[in-house]
Amino acid sequence: MTLPAEFHDIAKRVNNWGRWGTDDEIGTLNLVTDEVVREAARTVRSGRRVPLALPLQQDGVQTGMIPGRVNPLHSMVQINQELFGPGTVATSDDVVTMGLQAATHWDALTHASHSGKIYNGRSADTVTAHARAAFSGIDKVRHVVSRAVLLDVARAHGVDRLPGGHAVTPHDLEAAEEFASVRVRSGDVVLVRTGQMRVYLGGDKHAYGYPSPGLSVRTPEWFHAREAAAVANDTLTFEIVPPEIEDLWLPVHALHLVEMGMLQGQNWNLEELSEVCAQERRYAFLLSAMPEPFVGGTGTPVAPVAIL
Amino acid sequence: MTLPAEFHDIAKRVNNWGRWGTDDEIGTLNLVTDEVVREAARTVRSGRRVPLALPLQQDGVQTGMIPGRVNPLHSMVQINQELFGPGTVATSDDVVTMGLQAATHWDALTHASHSGKIYNGRSADTVTAHARAAFSGIDKVRHVVSRAVLLDVARAHGVDRLPGGHAVTPHDLEAAEEFASVRVRSGDVVLVRTGQMRVYLGGDKHAYGYPSPGLSVRTPEWFHAREAAAVANDTLTFEIVPPEIEDLWLPVHALHLVEMGMLQGQNWNLEELSEVCAQERRYAFLLSAMPEPFVGGTGTPVAPVAIL
Amino acid sequence: MTLPAEFHDIAKRVNNWGRWGTDDEIGTLNLVTDEVVREAARTVRSGRRVPLALPLQQDGVQTGMIPGRVNPLHSMVQINQELFGPGTVATSDDVVTMGLQAATHWDALTHASHSGKIYNGRSADTVTAHARAAFSGIDKVRHVVSRAVLLDVARAHGVDRLPGGHAVTPHDLEAAEEFASVRVRSGDVVLVRTGQMRVYLGGDKHAYGYPSPGLSVRTPEWFHAREAAAVANDTLTFEIVPPEIEDLWLPVHALHLVEMGMLQGQNWNLEELSEVCAQERRYAFLLSAMPEPFVGGTGTPVAPVAIL
Amino acid sequence: MTLPAEFHDIAKRVNNWGRWGTDDEIGTLNLVTDEVVREAARTVRSGRRVPLALPLQQDGVQTGMIPGRVNPLHSMVQINQELFGPGTVATSDDVVTMGLQAATHWDALTHASHSGKIYNGRSADTVTAHARAAFSGIDKVRHVVSRAVLLDVARAHGVDRLPGGHAVTPHDLEAAEEFASVRVRSGDVVLVRTGQMRVYLGGDKHAYGYPSPGLSVRTPEWFHAREAAAVANDTLTFEIVPPEIEDLWLPVHALHLVEMGMLQGQNWNLEELSEVCAQERRYAFLLSAMPEPFVGGTGTPVAPVAIL
């Protein structure tokens, strides 16, 4: 099996290899300049803060379908332990085991490869068990703070959630911009709401994953044209399930992560944010979505916060 | 052994139990109002962002001295795996096992107890292996975004780092305020720099932990008077090691977490921030330091970012 | 809720507290004397070895129903890594995270408590997050090597497997003895086959757990009378599900582990053994079922082997 | 760097590829026939059982020198939890994270590769993060039960332990045979005692690893000639540290695992066994050393037991 010509055509048009130098490891995050952040801070008006992460717990979004991607297993190593003797101050300590891509997360650029390559044309073989990602590991992303725009596609469509299998198109994104009276600009983080998270929050883990709306293979060109710095949505795999083009799985991963060098976020809970933006009639705000700096990580849990 | 009278006297003066209602689980974070956040956003001038987390890696700050508190163990479950057949898009996935208090972290209010109690007078027995922290778990903290002030005690003293065992006093904190031309106010997150992190960054893990400067048992009253929302520093245990008062270990934990209900941060890397603040001659800025929402967690790794 | 009088009556009759001294931590394993082992070795005739453990893998018997009891998550930290330079000998290394009671396992005596007590009348509070089991941890069991007897209750009944909910009674055990022409004697490990494992091996994890045959609350007295050293079976929880006596869950755990101080094994795969015993027309053999010596462990994975 | 001619010469002489068919995945364990096991059972005389595993605990033999090979981290997910309501039977459950090669263990044949090959001439690329070891994983070893011989080289030399760097030679092995009045024969598991474990048991983890006695590169030919089924010793890496031939690390791993297809055991505690064998004046006995059947595992913790 090889990737179809259609994929390669798009890949050529959105490719950013070399754009920020041959040594670059962070791709479109280069678009987030100090100026962008200064402007982003100016969008803060109400001071409201909306968290976008799902709770980290064993009963999380993973169903076992993706091998090795385990929900957080959280256990105790100390409980009110008086380490310095009876009657002294006691402490409790806990440990966790979890997949870095298991909950609300960023994919690092190295999370995907195709045709043996990762972002910036490096060999996929630079990802090893020993070093994990030697290049473009999530630790190379020093910070994700920028203006963010909520493109509430579901709300713009007048529905609670898009149907499973729905392909979010550039046209959908522009309709959401119009609905929000906002325009995505260089350095923005784009949050695309499909409403699919309501399936998980409603208790059906399996239907959350399948079938799912997601981003069409035609959207990377749109993000490329607008110079988005990163994109996140409220689905399990980011992509349309079952796939838009038969047997072509994860094309948007390959375009965003490998070709463009653009971070992708998944399992972001945009429900409360959707309510708040509708109330405040504002869809652009300051976002902090800092990766945990796992050295060589191909992903990271993230606890994003929108500051309105 | 019992806690000394001196401790109980201070405890009485700083106690916040019931201040925000008997149901409250977040303590002094109640001081971070929308107004505080609006003001905090206005401090952003240059748009520079300074990350404050240490890299997450097996070669981290833990030495094995604190049982169960393990450095991040990061391993691979997929490496460029073509899950959908040869020639398709490939993915890499990783998992981690780590102590929630092992690296740059927040202590949840439930991380400490004394005399059988946690914050707001609840029984310490509400922390169990099954539920972890039923009350005041780190997931109850929806967000930590506020104005932060760097009190660069080491720089104000004209030294690279304070000596091991040095007790940072209210007088030190005020000298650092004066040096910075800033005054801590209600809802601020206070970052106290001792310079001790230089010992770890210089390669000596053991000397990083012992001996260490830290916050004197007299400082909680000062934070209480100023209405700080949270405090973080650049040491392994937050406290003076060996302890300021013989055999009295972790008194500041007990005062901050149990009595005041105030989050504490440890192992924050304030070195780059110290340089940037000195360059920009500004010591107050916007801080985002979002907890990962571990349900019932008695701590959390955190990737704080100062936005100047 | 309290445990019913019926339970307490049986408990009194099977109680072994103090029988091997107030310091004893291993209970009925004291019955396995050197003489018992010498005799056990003499049962070896064909030299055939039959392993009784399920494969350790993420797709194991746990379904998430028992919180925290996770199937083995197995990941790589080195893959053919030439740690000493290119062209040198390479090594691969792996790590695992798993529940100690997740797969084929022994329950340690401390796995269960009732009325605040563990085996030998010690306080259940001696199990802590810090020390785990301070007494009767699985590491206190130096070895499990003895004669074992397969009581193939399913085969004696002439069925592939007993129906879900079936209570294996002393009468069933004696019928299986008669079928096998063997009699359980002091120091034996008794393996009770219900055939329930066929449900799991057939692919239905959920039906494996519920409904399930198991040992009746009347069997502990029988094991007590016969002086069994340990008992294992081929079910998820060892007990009848749903329970034999309404709302009385885990009574056999409480009787075996707490009152008698007798190890229990679960998820043992007795299918191949059943075939071999039928072929060889022998149901007594040498068994090695060594615990992994987790210090303070309340259970352990085990890879038992029958040597015929 | 390439492996020296000397290595390749030995490799050619001990190579077993194809000896048990091109599909074989277990190598020299094929030598353990039913007849060998029958004979092994006949060696049991006293019925004494001697366990050979180190306790599994966080304070284990690993020092952090070998990346990713973590000592067991053991934590609690339930402590006396009354899952079915107050007053019901309570249970305690625990989880562990550990390196499969971290404590007393067997190396699977796939633990080492050289020149791109694993045992039986398969490509080393068959070890992946996804499948772990597709061939010759530890799960392919159904059982390790055989006669074992203790070659107590230290005691035969009249010393407590051999000095660090000492190369155990075929001559040493034969002297130990003579001392023991035993001769290694086809299908035996050979336990080689250097006494190095005393360094660890004495509290010095670092000196346990370096410098260490180990097996000379000349011993694989001896094991090959005697048709040993597996070999274990009482050192951290099995091999001489620093290496016998400058810059040639892990040659014995490559010869045993890759060329011969022979399991290797490390960190076996042979101290008590040495005493017992000296008392009983017997050095051959029945051994059960069952691998935990990790699917695709490149190693496994093991709790071996000698039955005398």
Image (cartoon, coloured by chain):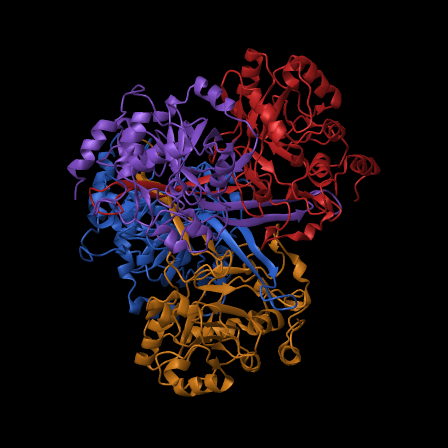
Chain colours: A blue, B orange, C red, D purple
Instruction: Answer yes or no: is residue B293 visible.
Output: yes
Residue B1's place in the image compared with C210, above or below, is: below
Residue C204's x, y, as percent? 55, 26
Asked which quadrant contains residue A147, the reply is bottom left
The structure residue drawn at horizontal position 47% and vertical position 32%, both measured from the top left corner, is: D289
Could you say which is closer to the camera, residue D72 or residue D29?
A: D29
The structure residue drawn at horizontal position 67% and vertical position 13%, both measured from the top left corner, is: C179
Q: How many circles with numbers are drawn on the protein? A: 0
Residue D196's place in the image compared with B156, above or below, is: above
Residue A33's x, y, as percent? 28, 66
Could you say which is closer to the camera, residue D99 or residue D34?
A: D34
Residue A139's place in the image compared with C53, above or below, is: below
Residue D62's x, y, as percent? 41, 50
Residue D15's x, y, as percent? 25, 27
Asked which quadrant contains residue B155, the reply is bottom left
The structure residue drawn at horizontal position 51% and vertical position 51%, both measured from the top left corner, is: A56
Could you say which is closer to the camera, residue A21 or residue A92?
A: A92
Instruction: Answer yes or no: is residue D107 visible.
Output: no
> In the rendered view, does D75 fall on the left or right side of D137?
right
> In the rendered view, does A277 fall on the left or right side of C160?
left
The structure residue drawn at horizontal position 40% and vertical position 80%, both measured from the top left corner, is: B162
Q: Quadrant of the N terminus of chain C?
A: top right
> In the rendered view, does C249 fall on the left or right side of D102?
right
